[in-house]
Image (spheres, rainbow, N blue to C red):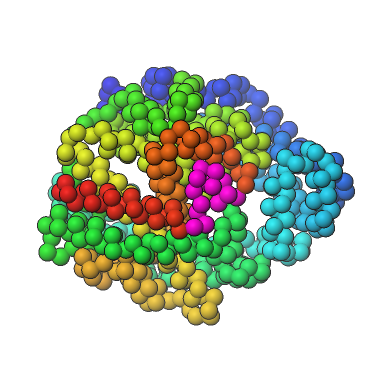
Amino acid sequence: MDSKELKTRDQIDSRYKWNIEAMMPDESVIDGQLDGISDSAEKFAADYAGRLTGDAATLLQAYRDRDSIWRSLEKIYVYARMKRDEDNADSRYQAMSSKCSAVIARVSASMAFFTPELLMAPEEKILGFIEAEDGLREYEFAIRDTLRLKAHVLSEAEESIMAQMSEVTGATGDIFTMLNNADLKFAEITDDDGDKVAVTHGNYITFMESHDRNVRKAAYNAMYDSYKDLINTVATCYSYNTKNDVVSARIRKFDSARDAALSSDNIPAEVYDNLVSVVNENLPSMHRYVELRKKLLGLDEMFMYDMYVPLIELPKKRISYEEGLDIMRAGLAPLGEEYIDRMNTGIAQGWIDVYENKGKTSGAYSFGCYDSYPYILLNYTDTLQDVFTIVHEMGHSMHSSYTREFQPYIYGSHSIFTAEVASTVNESLLMRYLLENETDPQMRKYLLNMHLEAFRTTLFRQTMFAEFEDITHRTVESGQVLTADNMCEQYEALNAKYYGDAVAKDDTIKYEWARIPHFYNAFYVYKYATGYSAATAISDRIINGGRAAAGDYIEFLKTGESDYPIELLKIAGVDMSTPEPIEKAMDTFNRLLDEFEKLV
């Protein structure tokens, strides 16, 4: 951008705005469409409740009508949310988003009978419908997936009770969110400029990356002193959250809370166990990296607050948006001409909203609906990290583009397990391209360290979190009580195991578990580590396997949710039910570490 002053939305050149008008050319029809959708949902309940499984033709039409209602509503909701994100101060789109949310609630209530009624019918009857009605073949995987969980679905009355209790059972997450984001305050510290600044969740990592060790230490202590002061409250909150997971799993006849969490994607338990096992076997490599960090920082004693400061200073270089796109095209070239052509077409069509403006939502995302472009929101600031952000979000959008072309609406989305693979494959390919073509020794060292840090924070750290979750849930399942003391003790032991002897023990890091919001969505974080491993293995395969391997990966991008994640990833040449992809990721980490050690 030409000026450092933040522009209003209408001051941004149209070349750098997404073409959202292609999605909804006439806003004036939205209110009428929403009213029509509400009426259609009421009619849906009247037409099908009590007769859903009367015959194959009725079931097929119910599936089609259900898809039609949700597809129409999704388009309006996504449009309203994206327009709101352009300028959050615009009350028109705040109101439109709120109305969409209300309609979503009404539609969900109208369709609540669908799954319980489907499961009340004998399984052989439903499978017979699939054989008898060709149109139901499209829905076969979805139907079989619903039937798979039949043993864990309760009676209609029990399901009603569970649904009514959900507001109560979800309270622990809401309590932690309010405590963490609204009530918890952190002390002021003196920043790099000598100013007094209060530590916040938003600026904490910036302080931890400071080259002034006093700033890092002060921020670290300010953060964890606040959690220490409230540790019994947070421990009680998390303990009851864990109890809720365990009790809900027992009620639904799962063997454990972890089995219940893995069941939604039909993930075998060995996927989780393989991740933890292989990462543990490779902890000596992590310890070697931490020892190197200590050496490069020139510290006699290194603490956890020294783990985020960059080891290599980034050479000063601004990368314009157009340059960033060119770098992306070069980095993703191994995916083939068709992929690049599709991506270029998307850029020309107006998928991307590039620059920050007043009121625009911060950060970056890929969003859209089945009937829209797979849009990308950016807040581009001409940095190398911004180039990685474009590549990451483009991975999501290309995944959506392929899926929506080749899959019907019902399979037109992605599980978290596979979605993060598409974005991380792109990042991995970009990093390989940059490393292969970088001639400046300082920049090469920076890139290697950046890559090693991604392994540390994603593969190692998220697996440590996964171990902690497993420990806490097993503790409750065995009849023991979670307390602040035993959770701090377990976390401190895990941290020592993962980081090794190079990190000196303090009385602070044991409280870190208390600030991790993901723990209130149990057995979720492991997907970051498995996704990173799968993406590393796939990018290896693409680089070494050429056109055929790239073709396999493109076929994977077309699959959406048409099968379970483990099966879909096999199309791309990766079997996450085995330890091999994680072992290959660890081989990559070791190769990077070997080169980095030689250069520094």
Task: Tell me residue 307's x, y (percent).
Answer: 24, 57
Residue 24 visible: yes
Q: Residue at x 55, y 51 (%)?
A: 566
Question: Compared with residue 539, is residue 469 higher up or lower down, i.e. above or below?
Answer: below
Task: Tell me residue 62's x, y (percent).
Answer: 79, 42
Question: Compared with residue 345, is residue 409 higher up or lower down, i.e. above or below?
Answer: below
Q: In which quarter of the image is the N terminus?
A: top left
Residue 87 visible: no
Q: Which residue is drawn at 47% across and 28% down?
A: 339
Judge from the rendering whether residue 536 lies leftward or rightward of residue 245; answer left or right.
left
Question: Compared with residue 109, is residue 469 higher up or lower down, i.e. above or below?
Answer: below
Which of these two is toward me, 109 or 488? 488
Q: Which residue is drawn at 69% across and 29% down?
A: 32
Judge from the rendering whether residue 228 lies leftward or rightward of residue 92; answer left or right.
left
Q: What stretch is highlighted in magenta?
A: 564-578
Residue 93 sits in quarter: top right
Judge from the rendering whether residue 135 lies leftward or rightward of residue 508; answer left or right.
right
Judge from the rendering whether residue 261 lies leftward or rightward of residue 198; answer left or right.
right
* Outermost residue, bottom side: 479
Task: Tell me residue 223's x, y (percent).
Answer: 29, 60
Which of these two is toward me, 475 or 125? 125
568 in magenta: yes
Task: Tell me residue 274's x, y (percent).
Answer: 46, 62
